[in-house]
Image (tube, rainbow, N blue to C red):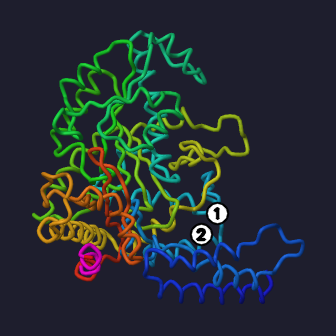
Amino acid sequence: MREAELQSLRDTHTSLEAQLRTTSRPLPEPRAVTKALESLHKSLPQTGSGTEQTADHLLNDLVPGLNGQSLSPSYYGFVTGGVTPAARVADAIVSAFDQNVQVHLPDETIATNIEDRALCMLLDLFRFNAAEWPSRVFTTGATAGNIIGLACAREYVITKKLARAGLERLQGEGILSSCRRANIDGFQVLTTLPHSSLGKAANIVGIGSECMLNVAQRDHSLDFDLPRLEELLAKSKTASIVVLSCGEVNTGAFATKSYDEVKAIRDLCDEYGAWLHVDGAFGLLVRALPEDRTFDSLRACGDGLELADSIAGDGHKLLNVPYDCGFVFCRHAEIPTQVFQNGNASYLRTGATDITSPLNIRLENSARFRGLPVYSTLLAYGRKGYATMIASMVRLARDIATYIRQDCPHLLLLPRDVEIETLFICVLFRARDEEANKTLTDGIKASRVVYGSGTQWDGMPATRFAIAKWDVDVERDLELVKSVLKA
């Protein structure tokens, strides 16, 4: 690359950093969006504009039309995290060196070593023993992690049914053939209040979203009805997968509240040959909270997750690393390889090593160097730094909820019986007046200073704030929210 081009990139980076320091609003002004749309080129130019002119177009024409979902501490939509400074520096290195993290080549690059070390550090943050999770890999997000988890689960439950019939799973055998031999006439995914991505995952792996069954208690929509769960698991011709929601998308609540609850579900899975998967997109970070009595009930919701067969999570949510970043852990080393192995490509093979080539245990062959920002931010903040970060998110969520309940007679905190001390990072509410409730979310967005997501609860529109930024300032951010909700 010529020196002039390098200097142009340096100047662009300097300009971008200046804009990052001054961007605090979650949404751009409407006129900025209109101007940015009008500036988009309508066709491929015959002659290129050059790096410098293109960079100027990006920074001055397009960037003002982007939202501040990652940059604004008051963007509370979609459980969207920000990017810690340490992760941002690492991500610049990722783009500059552009490693394709697919094959473990320890004599040629340390990229896979860094990713494996980052995954082990994550396991440590979550208080898991890395030795018990030999299959660990980065992927695009919790959706892909759920796909990997259900694909491994499908392999496992078929193999278990075959073994009980005295048969073995054949290498490369299709689902229909193996199910016929195992006398399986259907699958079921047993869960409570699942995220929509779980249905997508079930469709992709051939189980089907219609096989997802709600096994919640009648009066508690997240808690498992254990007698009903055992009744369904006992179906001799049905292969079963159980999924725990670790952080329900609207309330942030958890499907289990103690180690004993998870252990009871684990015991049933073992008895009937079922797989236990955890969708921990953002709720997994509950295990990073400090040992403080304020968080005792929350920390208990994360206890027992180490008993699962697989766990999926997001890095671009509460961990606050750039999109896209997810991860999946599996305690069965051989099963992901059976599902995702690239068996016939000799140029992708390596010798025996202690790190599995990532392409053999995940969906993608080619992949961005997602582990470096994770390694960087964990190194920069450590266990105590993340404990403080997550605790601040929880405290702000609880303070907002308290303000709504005590000082906003026109608003109703949801669920109606929610206890403040059980809240994690989500605040769900609606207007008491039905007509006002129809425009509540749009009215908050129109402020341009606070952003919340619209959703549905008990068949009615509702608004949800998800507190997920690394730079939460409880006092500052609470006053900003008050100024909007009071209006």
Element type at mark 1: loop
The residue under label 1 is: 99
Element type at mark 2: helix
Dots 2 and 1: beta carbons under 8 Å?
yes
Residue 317, located in which quarter of the rendered image? bottom left
The residue under label 2 is: 94
Q: Earlier in the sequence, mark 2 or mark 1?
A: 2
Between 476 and 486, the residue placed more toward the observer is 486
Which amino acid, by three-letter code, is at mark 1?
Gln
Residue 285, located in which quarter of the rendered image? bottom left
Q: Residue at x 16, y 36 (%)?
A: 219
Residue 385 position in % (x across, y down): 30, 73
Is residue 483 located in the magenta-colored stretch of the structure?
Answer: yes
Which amino acid, by three-letter code, is at mark 2?
Val
Give the crowd class for mark 1: few <14, some 14-19, many >=20 residues within 10 Å.
some
Quick check: 402 above or below 147?
below
In magenta, the rendered stretch is 479-486
